[in-house]
Amino acid sequence: MYLESNSPIIMWNNISLSEALSLKCDQAFQASSVVIDSRNVKSGCIFIAITGEKNDGHDYINQAIASGASFCIVERDNIVPQTFPHLVVKSSLKALEMMGSYARNRINGHVIGITGSVGKTTVKEMLRSAFSAHGETYATHGNLNNHYGMPLTLANMPPSTEFAIIEMGMSSSGEISLLTKLAKPDIAIITN
């Protein structure tokens, strides 16, 4: 997806998801990506229904399934067809964070975290370009750098990543602390 590769990689299945969330997931599935926006659902992804300030991902479960999601993570069980592979959690956002943390911990590569007032995306793209010549490089897509986007970025990181360039932004006090605990950067860059 954001890796310098053209072929889909199976990054999640019922075993890795069970480990990431410390919950039993008996329904077999495989997924090549994690999505929180139903408009971005593609065949073979996990759709996480997050209840946000303006939208509720649970309203888009049927759309996600119709678009090819292979698994759903939800907070309410009664909106998913019982035959469709899914897991009910207390907090979908916390599940996303746990998946991001799990994905970060399963790589042996180096993580470079970037934050600052301006220039984060530019620095991230320069580093992505430079490191791509030296190994399997993964970087934040666009500017998905907030408390939703950064864990999503990590959850989509392939296990074979050698260099991860992770952008971290904040809109409220304490947000960078949470993001750095998830990303555990080996190197930190603070822009202007």
Image: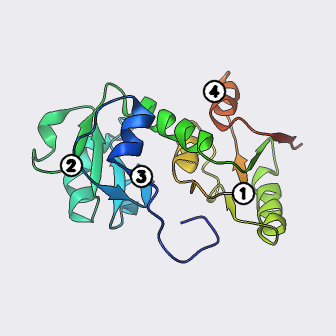
Query: Label 3 vs label 1: CA separation?
Result: 18 Å
Local crowd at mark 3 within 10 Å, few (<14), some, or many (≥20)? Answer: many
The residue tagged 1 is: 162
Q: Earlier in the sequence, mark 4 or mark 2?
A: 2
* Residue 28 visible within the image: yes
Identify residue for label 4.
178
Mark 3–mark 2 distance (CA, rounded to whole Å) = 13 Å
Q: Report which residue position mark 3 lands on.
A: 12
What's under tag 3, amino acid-wise? Trp
Q: Residue at x 66, y 38 (%)?
A: 183
Q: In the image, residue 92 lies at what x, y percent? A: 37, 34
**Is 85 rendered above or below residue 125?**
above
Residue 85 circle label: 2
- Front residue of 51/138: it is 138
Q: Are marks 3 and 4 in contact (CB under 8 Å)?
A: no
What is the C-alpha distance between the residues marked 4 and 1? 23 Å
Mark closer to the chain start, 2 or 1: 2
Single out the mark in the foreground, 4 or 2: 2
